[in-house]
Image (cartoon, rainbow, N blue to C red):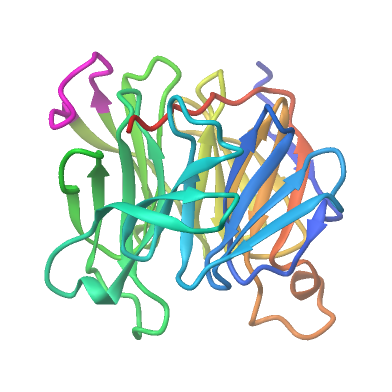
Amino acid sequence: MSSEFQVWEVKTPYLNLHCGLGEGPYYEPATQTVRFVDIKNKKLHTVSINDPADLVTLSFDEPVTVTADIAGVDPKDKILIGAKQGLAVLDRKTGEYEYISKMEGEGVDRIRSNDGAVDPQGRFWMGSMTDFGKGDFRPEGSLLRFTQTSPPQLALTSLTIPNSVGWSPDQRTMYFTHSNAREVLAWDYDPSPSPSSVVTLSNKRIFYQHVGSGEPDGFRVDVEGNIWHAVYGESRVLKLSPEGKLIGEVRLPTRNITCVEFVGEELFITTAGDDGAAEGEESKVNGGALFRVDVGVRGLGHDLFRL
């Protein structure tokens, strides 16, 4: 691969719903759609990758923050969701959901779920953090590991904004972003099958320390082991090498970039509204939109949650 710093520039949205906090894009190959959430407005959007006018929206009474597919279940019927109180299964035909595992402990009413992902063994890792309307964000969040058969287990505590979780192509490294610390952490990870309660993590280290005014938000990993990392507040997505070096960026016409998803060799990118921008300013106009750009590499597929 060329040693030159790579730059992609996106000028216009694919779809602009002016999401308050667009997040969690997830590709569904069978239906050629991308689904993503608007956490602030409590919605799940599903849009065709061939026609942005082909859009379906579900609304909820509490925030939905992340989604995943379930092994043996058609995602047109049901998917896994992170919701206010924990992990749930959503019936997409009725819009109703049922919790399979709830967060526990003192002060749980103050927190909500955030980003997360399914690991190679079919467990779901998800962060929790201070909910909107509960004052300033505090270090009261955690990184939790969920299965259907046991209560959520704590992996990390005293977190303020826990964000994306992901794995290297060989599944031997686990990555996790703590946004307000501007850190992407890494551990050695044992991908071998194991009981649902057993996880082997070792050699914790800082994989990437961000320097800048913004905060690293959500990411995905490509088949070459690069991490494509959204940065909230800096109008860009970073391309980080498997060694944690900044080797490229995608530039966008709005400040608050939240997460990314691969669709073939294209990157779909969610964003949040820019309340600090003036009316008519480019970042305000495009805030909360969904973007797409060809980056010339495919992403890793998603693991499936095991019910």
Please tell me how many numbered marks the rendered image carries: 0
Question: Residue 97: where, in percent of width, then height?
Answer: 44, 56
The stretch in magenta equals 188-202
At 80% across and 46% down in the image, what residue appears?
9
Question: Please, which residue is most extreme toward the front here?
Answer: 94
Image quadrant assignment for residue 167? top left
Image quarter (top left, top right, bottom left or bottom right) of the N terminus: top right
At 72% across and 26% down in the image, what residue appears?
265
At 37% across and 74% down in the image, what residue appears?
131
* 1 left or right of 281 in image: left
User: What secondary structure predominates along the stretch shown in magenta?
Assistant: loop
> Of residues 233 and 138, which is closer to you in this image?
138
Q: Is residue 2 magenta?
A: no
Image quadrant assignment for residue 189? top left
Image quarter (top left, top right, bottom left or bottom right) of the C terminus: top left
* 180 left or right of 268 in image: left
Vertical side of 67 occupied by 2: above or below: above
